[in-house]
Amino acid sequence: MKNVMIVFVLLFAVAMQAQQPADNAEPTVRIASGIVRGVTEGDVTIFRGIPYAAPPVGEYRWRPPQPVIPWEGIRDAKEFGPNCAQAGWGAAAGTIAEGSSEDCLYLNLWLPADAKPGDKLPVMVWIHGGAFVGGGGAGTSGRALAEQSVILMTFNYRVGRLGHFAFPALSEEHPEEPKGSYAFMDQIAALQWVQDNIAAFGGDPDNVTIFGFSAGGVSVHSVLTIPAARGLFHKAISESGGGRDGVLTGRPLREDNADPFYPISAETIGINFARRHGTEGTDAEALAKLRALSVEKIVDGGLENDGEGGPRIYSGPILDGKLVVETAESAYKVGRQAKVPLIIGNCSAEIGGGFVNSSRSKEELFSLFGELAEEAKSAYDPDGDKDFAEVITKFNTDWVWGEPARFTARAFVAQGAPAYIYHFGYVPPSMQQRSPYGAGHGSEVAYVFNTLNERRGGPEPTPEDQELARMMNAYWVNFAKTGDPNGEGLPKWPAYTPEKNEILDIQPDGMPVSEPDPRKTRLDVIEKARKFKYSIQSRGGI
């Protein structure tokens, strides 16, 4: 799993788009903490930069989100708040990304311009991606959702060492508080804000859909299985979020909780980071020195290791036992997740070689399957004529995203909750040379939000692009409204059952087709290989 978070954030940066709104009206809404003033653009009203928690700075660094301090008068909510502090691209040494800050717990809303209290509009809450080290809630637009009578909320959550951190003295202070994954605490606080405030904007707090991509999709799994999040949402969508252990999931807090995927505990990683910055010891004095470090030193250029091959200094999500009590996979296996309708899926060529498996040839890859080697070869290269690059891309995609999505859907169906699987394989003609084996990580996001016309640079969307965006956006909106993605003018998307194994397969030409999952043979051998995963890994592979 080395460098997994770096790869995720690189892919995330390619996938996200920005927006440039124009002001023309200034509606105001009273919420629990004061009055906010937004902007109306045509038939959509937008509120940006609303605080949902107090700034997590000073004594509140590495503490759960604190209540917002109410304000007097009217607070402008026309501009996005800063992203949470992160390294960014091309930032000078010793700096953080432009537009990012440790004071960052802000959210944004898109809603119909005529929305009013009592309308009970469905609410969609987007959890951004970025490998838990980057990204922000300003990365997309909810205009197309609002135009279909849905409220979209996006928000920032702490990332990097500000979002996931452990240290012995930190574990001991405030024993009544959860520790470790402050990013997940922020996500839960944002959902609680929806419960407390969304009715004032015309939203229905009893019809909330969480959805996210990449690390946001991983977050959806975590929120589905964190007890403290129960009752704060009613439907879930995980886009390229996996569902199995091992990728951005559940590092143990302490050394006494051994894990084959994460042999180094989060507390040990925190000690490594402290030593990098000249702090020895693990007591309260050492923690005070860490809290006194500048935000630039905490972000530390986004480094995850102290030098090439050095000790690890960033943990990623933490299994602390109080907030995150188990991984999503362990919860799904015994049915402890929230019983809500689910959409889950991934793109057809998420990532190529070196991500999960470092094999250098087809023969080396297949040999790692042991007694399943011939079955794996038959599934991935039946005629022996595929390029290794294609085989390893499909394998890594299936291992990290495809088979885990099927596993998750089965877990929900077993508990009586409907599940819908999609597989996004569309590659626009302009991208086919760059993506010869299928759709890459995040390819579906602009289609889900129907923001193709807002992309800067690049080719103009084709009629096929526009029609696929209309359909993908409509599926997501229908699901948010009713728990069923189907609706007028859309190809049928059957609910998943293990017996029929039907999915919505978005073809390379952009046409959604309902059919038995064409990846079944590949996913079956992956599922079998997981029974031998530790021995396979010990032989250098998966």
Image: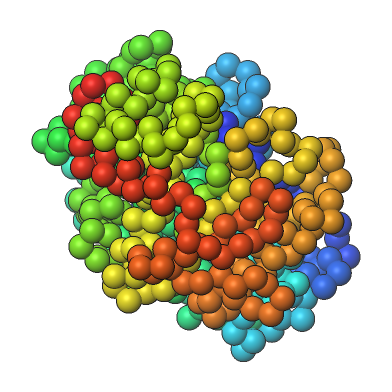
Q: Count of labels shown?
A: 0
**What residue sits 57% from the left and 57% below the top?**
505
Which residue shows up at 46% across the image and 49% down it? Answer: 519
Residue found farthest to the bottom: 118
Image height of 140 relative to 436, above or below: below
Q: Nearer the viewer, residue 460 or 158?
A: 460
Q: Position of residue 99 (x, y in %)?
A: 66, 38
Viewport quadrant of the C terminus: top left
Q: Nearer the viewer, residue 17 or 26?
A: 17
Image spot of residue 7 (x, y percent): 50, 30
Q: Residue lying at the far front in this picture: please name it.
A: 383
Q: Is residue 242 above or below residue 207?
A: above
Asked if one can make out residue 104 in the rendered structure from this viewpoint, the answer is no
In the displayed orientation, state which residue is furthest to the left: 256
Image spot of residue 429 (x, y percent): 77, 41
Q: Residue at x 64, y 45 (%)?
A: 443
